[in-house]
Image (cartoon, grey):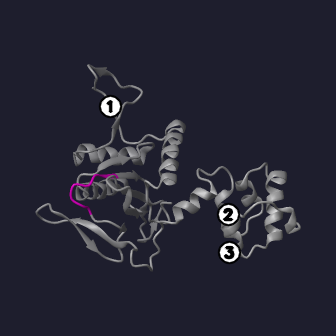
Amino acid sequence: LRLPAEDREGPYDDAEQELMTEFGATPDQIAWRRWCIPNNCQGAPDIFLQEYPHIANVAFLTAGDPAFNYDEIKLVETSVRRREKSKAAVYGLVEENEVGKIAFRKTRKGNLSVWELPQPDHRYYIGADAARGLLSQDGNQHGDFSAAVCIDGSTGKQAFTYAARIAPKEFAFVLHLLGHFYNRAMMNPEVTGGDGSAVFIELRDKYHYPNIMAWRGKNDRRTRGVSNNPSMGWETTWKSRQRMLVVYRKVIRTGDLETYDRETR
């Protein structure tokens, strides 16, 4: 669709320049886009991308009620590291030897994608979401992936991603190893639902993990400013999800967070 190019006014913005240089849009097509957004799309570029996508995955990214708009997703993708590049992740797993020492071992079959091994004196934060991924009797995996992401709090850069179809108790053991390996990282397991609660209980009661995220919950009682009943782990509610997204969107736009994994973004 086109309008005469002379109907447009002003220089091309970043989105228009991208359409012209990467996708071959003509000035007449840019002129039509400028007319269409306010007249057919309520003035919203995201609606335009959904209704008139220039590539297929744009319509998918903007459909429904996404947490992030197209510009934010494009911004995050600038830090994604492709597997074929030299700075791609190293794949492997963490293991505990007979004397209790935890170490990383490279293997292409590992479920751990590492961009940064633990650095001395750096603070790390791990978010974890459990699922019930199990082995069936025929040896095939089924169910959803349990996943964890680690951020270096000293730099804002992603340290690792873990994803595997494993049972919650096995996932808790993996998190126990990963947390200790990354300088006793602050662990923030998602506790909503039975699988998340099972992981949290294993971390707290079996492994006595020393650094689980605690916060002042709705049933918190304080004596002289010290909480005697803190809530632990991440409980997903409508309000907590909105707060999380607000913070995440902020650090995306300020550049304070770098995510390297395409699945994380």
What is the C-alpha distance between the residues marked 2 and 1?
47 Å
Residue 141 percent across, percent down from the top left: 44, 67
Give me the residue at 43% from left, 66% from top.
136
Quarter assignment of residue 99: bottom left
Camera-nearest residue between 97 and 17: 17
Could you tell whether 99 is left or right of 87 in the image?
left
Question: Which residue type does callout 2 highlight?
Answer: Ala
Q: Which quadrant of the structure image shows residue 101?
A: bottom left
Q: Which residue is mark 2?
A: 15
**Which residue is drawn at the image coordinates 66% and 69% (left, top)?**
18
SS label for mark 2 = helix
Residue 216 in view of the camera: yes
Front of the two marks 3 and 1: 3
Q: For marks 2 and 3, give the CA distance.
A: 10 Å
Residue topped by disc 1: 230
Q: Amino acid at mark 1?
A: Pro
The main secondary structure of the magenta stretch is loop
Give the x, y percent position of residue 59.
Answer: 70, 62
Badge 3 element:
helix
Residue 215 on the magenta segment:
no
Up-down relation of residue 218 to residue 9 (above or below): above
SS for callout 1: loop
What is the distance, in whole Å, between disc 3 and disc 1 at their CAs?
54 Å
* Span colored in magenta: 118-125
Callout 2 crowding tier (Cα within 10 Å): few <14, some 14–19, many ≥20: few
Residue farthest toward the right in the current orientation of the protein: 4
Q: Earlier in the sequence, mark 2 or mark 3?
A: 2
Per the image, the residue denoted by label 3 is: 21
Marks 3 and 1 close (CB-CB < 8 Å): no
Q: Nearer the viewer, residue 248 or 17?
A: 17
Residue 178 x/y as whole percent: 28, 58
Determine contact: label 2, label 3, CB under 8 Å. no
